[in-house]
Image: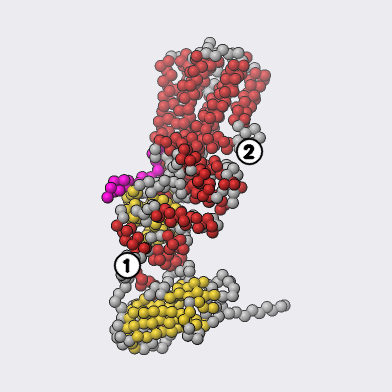
Amino acid sequence: MSVEATTARSRGPSALGGGLRRFLSLTFTLAATDFKLRFFGSALGYLWTLMRPLLLFGVLYFVFTEVVRFGDDIKNYPVYLLAAIVIFTFFSETTARGVNSLVERENLLRKVRFPRMVIPLSVALHALFNLGLNLVVVFVFVLASGIEPRVAWLELVPLVAVVVVFATGLTMLLSALFVRYRDVQPIWEVVLQMLFYASPVIYVTEFLPDNIERKAMANPITAVLTQMRHSLIDPTAPTAAEAIGGGVRLLVPLAVVVGSFALGLWVFMREAPRIAEDL
Amino acid sequence: MKATLSNPSEARARALERAPAAVSVQDVSKTFRLPHQVYSTLKERALHPFASRTYDEFRALREVSFEVKQGEFFGVVGRNGSGKSTLLKCLAGIYQVDRGDLRVAGRVSPFIELGVGFNPDLTARDNVMINAIMLGLSRKEARAQFDEIIAFAELEEFVDLKLKNYSSGMGVRLGFSVAIQVDAEVVLVDEVLAVGDAAFQQKCFAEFDRMKSEGRTILFVTHDMGSVERFCDRGLVLERGRIVDMGAPEQITRTYAELNFGQLTEAVEDTDEPAREGAARILAAWCETGDGERATVSRQGEELAVCVEVAFSRDVEDPDFTLTFRNEARHTIFVASTQIREEPTGRFSAGQRATVRFAFENRLGPSRYTITPAVGERDLSHEAHAYAEDLAAVIVQAPHYTGGVIDMPFAVEVERA
């Protein structure tokens, strides 16, 4: 009767259970498939991944250097604009596609047992693939505009990591809520629009009055973009710590990142067992 | 009923009885909440965005309890919406049960449907990899078994064809081929045999036989009673989330037919009760042609007679003799009984034997029919003295197949205006 020992009470689906290897290979497979299918059938294929931020860049660049003449005051404005667009695109792509990711994968969720967290994570991973490609273009622009490579460029790694954690946390939160409240999607679209202008993508925080600048820095994206400008494009630009008025205050945007990730994780873990039937 | 060990299925049944349980389900209930659609004006909605929502409760499973032995091929049948798929999803770990205890020994396959995650825009190659990983194989395993999967599906020539260019049968073949690679001790299968051409179905059957011989436990949801009888060791019938019957395949298919097509004859209902020492015994039943020759085949339009030989062990007054004809789908097609006739059948004394001959013009559609003779009390109890399920069979042949279960003689008149 040795078989008895293996009898396990079968549990319902969970957010994470089922073995790390399967979790990782599933996440990777879903992300890679999405990446492959995204521009499937289009003439330019993968190039669209690069073209979209570049086209947006083209429009904004024209408006803010030729029409509004606003970029003149910022050193290497075109490069900054492109880098900021690429980072923000990663954030908006992850969260916007993340919102309905669970609903889109209804077929899988209802028919296969697998850790539910795979789905929001694969969305973030897919966006990360795109970010990787786009950053290559950014570096080409950076070098072409005559900026010397520096060790400080390595700061980009933790900066991107912060955005990834922030976007992933929000994706977990939004996707889990969207299953039950379909109002989440239109709301989030508006919030993303607001965030685009609230973050220094087309401008830099120096332009803001001091007291507003400090408050704006509570937005993690603002903090990341400001620090990125300092370390990647213009060493004379203020660091994030300077912009917020003291390194300790950087704990505020950091707390926003950690808090939203924790909230997203908690909500997702709580909803995971019932996602398949609530769809 | 005396069991003989020389009978392989008997031996298998005994072995299964001793086997440990692979799946044990205790009082499992599952209820879904179906939110009501609240029709309200935009204004109301805006003023009360979080107004309490009302739900309808749908009880998909109600206190379901059963046990499946290791190595058993277990059928789950029931009408649409009876809770079969919910049960399988609970076992697969896709749904969480509300109440009750659900235990599975060993690895259970995590999916209930074939070809989950197939994407029409990807080639068979990509789809196989994705599907295999979804079903729990590692990338390495999936790559290693890729050729085998394609070979089993017989799709070598189409590996790089996009799935949308596949016929639906090809897609299912691909899905089945991946699914059988999954290393699970308890396999859940939801309705697969309805698709695929005859040759591939044969392969699937062979695969099921292989799984059986490997001692894997299989839970099989289907509407096809033929495959239940062919493969299953036991099964259960679900109706509105409850188990209404559980047991041998023949019993299951009968209950299922009953659910679908209304009640069978009274005599059949008595099958639930164990065979009693009745006042009579049915010794034999056979078919005859009009001129009294025994036959197993009858031609439509000719006379068909069914004879039942009965021995009485007690004195019986006016017993009723009944025949029930059922076709291959287990539908009751025709019941002939002395009960509906006025004249009494007379008195039979203990030890007496009698042969009852029913004769009629054969108007049955071409099929194989089984005949269940019964002897019962004429009084209101209709108590059965003797009953022999499917004792005789007859194959009806006809010059043409109309699709109907009977072929009545008819006249046609066309009146032109």
Disc 2 vs disc 1: Cβ atoms closer than 8 Å?
Answer: no
Q: Which residue appears at 50% of the width and 46% of the height?
A: B148
> In the rendering, which numbered label is found on residue B4?
1
Badge 1 local density, few (<14 within 10 Å), some, or many (20+)? few
* Left or right: B127 in relation to B342: right
Which contiguous range is marked in magenta? A1-17
The residue beneath circle 2 is: A41
Label 2 in the same subunit as label 1: no
> In the rendering, which numbered label is found on residue A215?
none
Q: Quadrant of the C terminus of chain B?
A: bottom right
Q: Nearer the viewer, residue A144 or B227?
A: B227
Q: Which residue appears at 61% of the width and 47% of the height?
A: B165
Q: Is residue B137 above or below residue A165?
A: below
- Residue B59 percent coordinates (x, y): 40, 54
- Nearer the viewer's eye, disc 2 or disc 1? 1
In which quadrant of the rendered view does residue A62 lie?
Answer: top right
Residue at far left of view: A1
Mark 2: amino acid: Gly
Q: Nearer the viewer, residue B186 or A34?
A: B186
Mark 1: amino acid: Thr
- Residue B257 percent coordinates (x, y): 44, 66
- Figure coloring: secondary structure
Q: Quadrant of the N terminus of chain B?
A: bottom left
Q: Secondary structure at mark 1?
A: loop
